[in-house]
Amino acid sequence: MSYQAVFEEFYEQVKLSIQQGTFAKLTMAKTIGDTDLKNIFVRLRLLEDQTYDFAFTFRYKTEEVERFHSIEQTYLILSSYIRNPFQSALLFTTEKDLIFKVNKKGTGSLAEQLPTFKHASDVMLEMVEKKIV
């Protein structure tokens, strides 16, 4: 199965984890080759109007850059980094860790592991408390 279709499935799980109040964080890792960009960390950010977006931390060799994007923009941004330079994305929830990988042939796969985090992110907990999701 092409990695794009599998990544869409992965991102649906990201949105579902937010709806269910289990989202902890999302990370893109395992670069292809030696690149200046080392990781991308994505967390939720609650806005003053009681909506949310994503805070991205782009970790480079020499600096970190933070940017903010909507849920729709987030899919496009993350998908643009698959295979350029990242091979994997990890979704951490309180129910499971979901790992998206793309191999050298361009085939995507999903794997589940036991959850790393026992608690959702503080922003996720606040959103659940305020009934934003």
Image: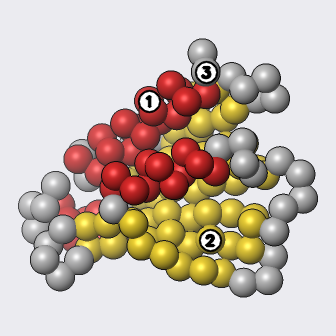
Coordinates of residue 31 in the picture (x, y in percent): 78, 52
Q: On the image, numbered disc 1 is attached to which residue?
A: 9
Residue at 13% across / 61% down in the picture?
Answer: 132
Residue at 50% across / 69% down in the picture?
Answer: 56
Q: CA distance from mark 1 to mark 2?
A: 23 Å
Q: On the image, numbered disc 3 is attached to which residue?
A: 2
- From this view, report whether residue 90 is shown above or below residue 54: above
Residue type highlighted by circle 1: Glu
Mark in front: 3 vs 1: 3
Q: On the image, numbered disc 2 is attached to which residue?
A: 58
Q: Earlier in the sequence, mark 3 or mark 2?
A: 3
Q: Earlier in the sequence, mark 1 or mark 2?
A: 1
Quadrant of the frame with the C terminus: bottom left
Secondary element at image label 2: strand
Q: Earlier in the sequence, mark 3 or mark 1?
A: 3
Residue type highlighted by circle 2: Phe
The mark tally for this picture is 3
Residues tagged 3 and 1 counted as in contact (Cβ below 8 A): no
Residue 38, located in which quarter of the rendered image?
bottom right
- From this view, report whether residue 20 is shown above or below residue 117: above
